[in-house]
Image (cartoon, grey):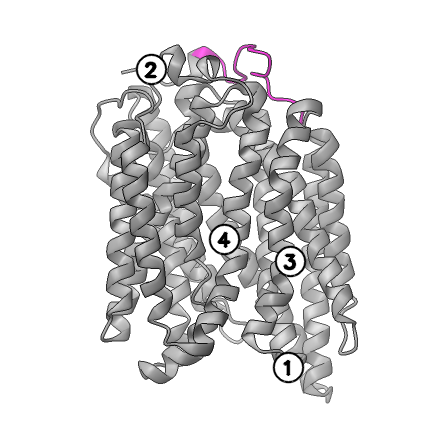
Amino acid sequence: MSAQLPDHQTGAGRQAGKTPTVIRLLVLATFVVILNETVMLNAIPRLMKDLDVTERAAQWVSTAFMLTMAAVIPVTGWFLQRVSTRRAYTIAMSVFLAGTALSAVAPTFAVLLLGRVVQAGGTAVMMPLLMTTLMTVVAEEDRGRVMGNVTLAISVAPAMGPVLSGLVLQVASWRWLFAIVFPIAAGVTWFGLRKLENVGEPQTGSIDWLSVAFAAFGFGGLVFGLSRFDPDNLTSPSLLVAAGVALIAVFVVRQLRLQRTDSPLLDMRVLQSSTYAKGLVLMAVAFLAMLGSMMLLPLYLQKLRGLSPLETGLLVMPGGLAMGVLGPTVGKVFDRFGGRVLVIPGAIGVTLSLAGFTRISMHMPYWQMLALHILLMVSLAAAFTPVFTLSLGALPMNLYSHGSSMLSTLQQVAAAFGTALVVTVMTSRSTSLAKHGTDGVTAMLSGMRWAFAISATLALIVIVMAVLLPNRSATHGHHAPEVAPDLEPARS
């Protein structure tokens, strides 16, 4: 994937203004697989009843998916350099289909959990594959526009998950959530294999299994520890987080050593690009804020305002749709004017929307909730597309797969950290007030306001990073990459 490509396979050889077929196919497949990350959120009560499990156990259908993503994605940078585009696509979609089929017919909760893990294994490959291929085949002047189309897949899909599950669960079993997806995913896979072309030539090289183990247990342990945070029991999760961080540190040291022989699992030289590093921080904090709000809003709407899961999904759907629909427009603006005109207002919008959510009450009109959520999603759309493009565009071609893998890994960690943070702050505050005689509803509302306030405060970091980002990457206009040639991995 990172070898030198002939002109007809690189951005230089593409017709400006047209999205390559390979990108269209990968966006479609990515939409289908990412949809499944949130499709089970509304099915927890049904699982508890049908498979006779507790609520905490049932939550694992989502937690296990996120854990697997965090453990597998760090390996994709190495993987995508060693296999062809078609093979990576075939493996990813075949694994996803196997997990979907297993989940649909699962006789027990343990089998369902295994199916979700297998599903996530396929999903973990698709996003880095899409990003790496996009950066390789799309011309510099068109990347913003095409990246805007990618935004549609990665933003609308999670927003549609709860809505789709709410509709299905009104009339059918949770098994239909997988039974419906399977033929769609199978059709996408078949169509993709008919039309998909290979991009570049794979490199050769062996895998360092110690690095795989350190990555899996390090990132997986960190996400697991964060997902288990409970104000009443901080010791065990803290130990898991500490162990995860320690293993990640060992993983990083090993990658630095392996870089001397051009065999790292995840190349750390991507961090020597200042633009990429700033974009990484911005994306992590913005993703943390987004996932925190996605966790808090359903709790507020269902537990305090009494809405059904379907009504909740329909209320938050316009924000996700607005984010996706605006993606292509944001991309075109970026191609013409650069990133700062989008990223800075977007960062400010994220902060203002989260600050607005600190005013939630039992009587806040739903239209205000809708307006704040749309502002948040639109602001994130204005930031995500330029930051993805600027960050990866600052890297040389042979580091694209590693850069996209690191971005995707950090998203999973940020998602887990954001969820743990808002739940811990909300629960701690509401528990403290309840002990002093405050009624349950008022205490929970106060806890949610505090959680949104913390998210809004962290979003100030997004504004700082937005101001520090350049208007365009160093490669724009065919200049030299920001990462010096002597820091690039040797080509096989």
Where in the figure is residue 398, as x and y percent of width and height?
39, 21
Mark with earlier residue (3, 1): 1
Q: Secondary structure at mark 3?
A: helix
Q: Tell which tag, 2 or 3, sits nearer the viewer.
A: 3
Q: Tell which tag, 2 or 1, sits nearer the viewer.
A: 1
Residue receiving disc 3: 318
Q: Secondary structure at mark 2?
A: loop
Q: Image quarter for residue 125?
A: top left
Mark with earlier residue (2, 1): 1
Asked if the residue under mark 4 is in contact with the one under mark 2, i.e. CB atoms within 8 Å, the reply is no
Residue 424 appears in the picture as rendered: no
Horizontally, residue 354 falls left or right of residue 155, namely: right
Name the residue rendered at 37%, 73% in the picture: 174
Where in the figure is residue 105, as x and y percent of width and height?
24, 69
Q: Which range of residues does the magenta coloring cover?
A: 469-485
Residue receiving disc 4: 157
Horizontally, residue 179 falls left or right of residue 350, namely: left
Residue 47 appears in the picture as rendered: yes
Q: The disc labelled 4 sits on which kind of residue?
A: Ala
Name the residue rendered at 65%, 39% in the picture: 383
- Tell me the number on the disc at residue 39: none
- Between the C-alphas of marks 2 and 4, the distance is 38 Å
Q: The disc labelled 2 sits on which kind of residue?
A: Ala
Residue receiving disc 2: 490
Mark with earlier residue (2, 3): 3
- Between the C-alphas of marks 1 and 4, the distance is 25 Å
